[in-house]
Amino acid sequence: MYLIFEGVDTSGKSTQAALLKESYPDAILTKEPGGTKLGGEIRRLILHEGVQNHKTELFLFLADRAEHYAEVILPHRDRLVISDRGFISGIAYAMANHPEYRLDFLLELNRFALDDTLPDLVILLKTNEALIRQRLSKKSEDMIEKRGIDYLLQVQRNMIDILKQINIKYHIYDASEPIGTIHQKIKGLLA
């Protein structure tokens, strides 16, 4: 099973992905961008140095996604693969950066990068302005987070819209619930 955790920065997706890995020790835990050697470099470039051209940023994310699929997802499709982020984020952030990008265009690019293999399940952790503000105050912000809370909330709205428009199994959980409660609900989906 190929499962991706989605949500904007500070929503708790990385925490939930790590908890699920603890519950399923044989699972593969990975992330986008950064789940491969190339992805690590792309992550560093985008999150810490910044990219000036929006098309460059889009293609870097797609390059990471294609490499990640070939190196991590495809070879382990017989196991539980847990990914911290995936193509939903890629599309949602691209649409927030450039509203003129159409969903069908971005979906086609992502299907190409993923050899038309979409995840079996998407878990979206939905947050709110107060929770984002509280959690961002406890960490240093990367280049994406510096775009602001309104930007992150727009990305989240995009994620929800995307999930509603494509044919993929998904569940949305309130990120303000206790971590253990969310984890138990997610484990219940896999039982």
Image (cartoon, rainbow, N blue to C red):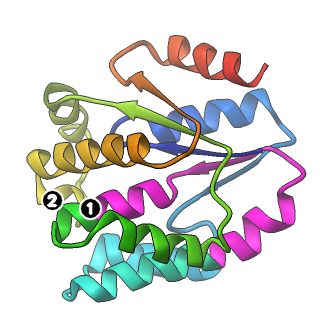
Residue 79 belongs to the span the image colors magenta: yes
Residues at discs 2 and 1 in contact (Cβ within 8 Å): yes
**From the viewer's perspective, is residue 80 above or below residue 75?**
above
Q: In which quarter of the image is residue 50?
A: bottom left
Residue at which label 2 appears: 146
Q: Where is residue 62 in the image (x, y as percent from the top left)?
A: 48, 78
Q: In which quarter of the image is the N terminus?
A: top right
Vertical relation: 137 (above or below) 87: above
* 36 relative position to 176: left or right: right
Q: Which residue is drawn at 47% across and 38% down?
A: 13
Disc 1 crowd, CA 10 A, few/some/many (<14, 14-19, 20+):
some
Position of 112 relative to 3 (above/below): below
Q: Residue at x 24, y 72 (%)?
A: 101
What is the three-letter code of the residue carrying label 2? Lys
* Direction from residue 86 to residue 157 in the image, left or right: left
Q: What residue type is labelled 1?
A: Asp
The quadrant of the image that shows the C terminus is top right
Magenta segment includes 61: no
| Residue name at image x 49 percent, y 60 percent | 87
The one nearer the camera, 176 or 158, is 158
The range drawn in magenta is: 67-93
Residue 9 visible to an observer of this rendering: no
